[in-house]
Amino acid sequence: MTAVSLRDVTRTHGQVHALGGVSLEVAPGELVAVMGPSGSGKSTLLNLAGGLDRPTSGSVLIEGTDLSGVKDLAALRRRSVGYVFQDLNLIPSLTAAENVMLPRELDGVRARAAREQALLVLAELAADQLADRFPEELSGGQRQRVAIARALVGERRLLLADEPTGALDTATGDEILQLLRARCDDGAAVLLVTHEPRYAAWADRVVYLRDGRLAEAGSVRMESAR
């Protein structure tokens, strides 16, 4: 079963055709990078893949479930999909641990158990020492780690990352890709939007979007990128 499948998906916003007839599948354990010029539909593709937006036509399936028939998309996303947003979307009034805990608490997990889970995934990312600090007290790389921890908590099997290395130095960006690659190698599926060939080289496959359509695809996994 594929982790996520987009079948002939289109998305229009008024007269703007953001995506036109895109089909894409990502399997468990696979890291797929999405590249393309600004305005090509990369973020729209990511939003549709995770159920943040609905297609104008076509279908999106997560682990075989057609999202068009899901009434509570938010609950499905919390269980199955982790997001690393381009602007991170950390809540400034919550500590790092509280930001990571939030999806689990929304799913009814008690605070103590949610914190234990948050601390475990923060430790996995070598960020557990940041648990009680607020986002404004963290560096850009540290905030990225917290955002990734929030995306990973609860053992989600599909991870969507929109330019997760944006505004980071090369060394920190490499660390972020190592984390994503390791999670993928453990069986999660990763869909990564990036404009950097350096980071796309970590992927098993690269797809290119141009004017809302897939232009080409290929395998580019390079051991030299590691």
Image (cartoon, rainbow, N blue to C red):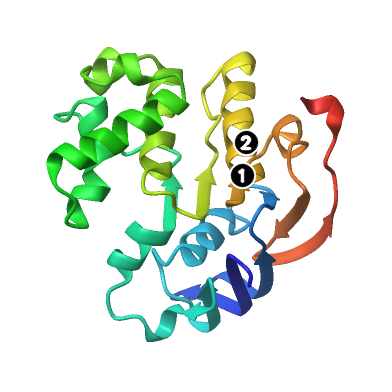
Q: Image point 58% across, 67% down: which residue? A: 4
Residue sitting nearer the eye, 29 or 67: 29
Q: Is residue 122 left or right of residue 97?
A: right
Report x, y in % for residue 22: 66, 73
The answer to whether the residue labelled 1 contacts the one labelled 2, judged by CB atoms less than 8 Å apart, is: yes
Report x, y in % for residue 147: 38, 34
Residue sitting nearer the eye, 152 or 33: 152
- Quadrant of the image containing the N terminus: bottom right
Query: What amino acid is at disc 1?
Result: Asp
Q: Image point 33% across, 57% down: which residue? A: 78
Provide the residue designation for mark 1.
186
Report x, y in % for residue 74: 29, 65
User: Neighbour class for label 2 at 10 Å: few (<14), some, many (≥20)?
Assistant: few
User: Neighbour class for label 1 at 10 Å: few (<14), some, many (≥20)?
Assistant: few
Q: Image point 26% across, 49% down: which residue? A: 103
Provide the residue designation for mark 2.
182
From this viewpoint, is residue 146 visible?
Answer: no
Residue sitting nearer the eye, 159 or 198: 159
Q: Is residue 46 left or right of residue 186?
A: left
Report x, y in % for residue 45: 56, 62
Q: Considering only vertical position in the picture, is 215 above or below 63?
A: above
Mark number, residue 97: none
| Quarter residue 58 falls in | bottom right
Q: Is residue 60 left or right of residue 113?
A: right
Which of the two marks, 1 or 2, is nearer to us in this view?
Answer: 1
Query: What amino acid is at disc 2?
Result: Ala
- Quadrant of the image containing the C terminus: top right
From this viewpoint, is residue 173 visible?
Answer: yes
Q: Image point 85% across, 35% down: which residue? A: 222
